[in-house]
Amino acid sequence: MAKQFSGFEPEHECFVAEQHIFFVATAAPEGRVNLSPKGMDSLRVLGPNRLVWLNLTGSGNETAAHLRESPRMTVMWCSFTRRPLILRAYGAATAIHRDTPGWAELYAHFPDEIGARQIFDMTVDLVQTSCGYAVPFMDFREPRETLHNWAEKAGPDAIATYWAERNAVSIDGKPTGIPADLPVS
């Protein structure tokens, strides 16, 4: 059954490192709740009460918009192999943009990605495990390289244009805080 912890325990960190996918949920006080699957090598646990994840260019930018109004965030991992387990981290997060102090320090934790858009820095106040008995078994085949390949082919100028046209506001019309003239490198 569910157990609660004040932060990540070493076994939780090992579990997180083994997962190929995680899910992020945020919500502003008004508007839609966002739940997004994330992959690639884009998440790091930096201590018992801190995690960061690299947000790559995508079709939306809901998380950044939501955090401008409410810092609440939940991150979830679930095992599709071996023992059934669901792990959730609850807390508050901030968006670190390329032009924000601290970007370079946090970005150094990740592989270089041309489409890196923000880093979300989360202070974790609760970690919860639950059984995951109903989560199906699934096999991991390989990472999907489509996003990386798209960003490499598009190049910095096209990505900057994409951010300005598709990532500056949420689906509810809320600003995401991504600077329109931010250089992509």
Image: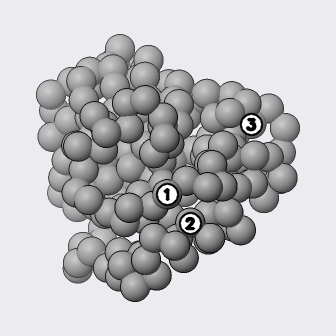
117 is higher (above) or lower (below) than 74: below
Residue type highlighted by circle 3: Ala
> Which quadrant of the structure image shows residue 148?
bottom left
Seen in the image, is 115 located left or right of residue 93? left
Which residue corresponds to mark 2?
160
Residue underneath mark 3 = 28
**Mark 1 closeness class: few <14, some 14–19, many ≥20 residues within 10 Å:** few
Q: Residue at x 84, y 52 (%)?
A: 173
Residue 50 in percent (x, y) is at 34, 25
**Dot label at residue 183:** 1
Q: Nearer the viewer, mark 3 or mark 2?
A: 2
* Residue 15 seen: no
Q: Residue furthest top?
A: 6
Colour pattern:
one colour
Front residue of 165/23: it is 165
Secondary structure under the numbered disc 2 in the rendered image: helix
Quadrant (top left, top right, bottom left, bottom right) of the C terminus:
bottom left
Marks 3 and 2, Cα distance to the nearest angstrom? 25 Å
Residue type highlighted by circle 1: Pro
Could you say which is closer to the camera, residue 74 or residue 178?
A: 178
- In the image, 22: left or right of 165? left
Of the residues shown, which amino acid type is indicated by label 2?
Answer: Ala
Badge 1 vs badge 2, beta-carbon distance below 8 Å: yes
- Residue at horizontal 37 percent and vertical 30 percent from the top: 102
Q: Quadrant of the N terminus?
A: top left
Structural crowding at the residue carrying mark 2, measured as other residues with C-alpha within 10 Å and reported as few (<14), some (14–19) or many (≥20) = many
Query: Which residue appears farthest toward the bottom when viewing the image?
Result: 153
In this view, 185 is above or below 162: above
Which tag, 3 or 2, sits closer to the chain's start? 3
Residue 147, quarter of the rendered image: bottom left
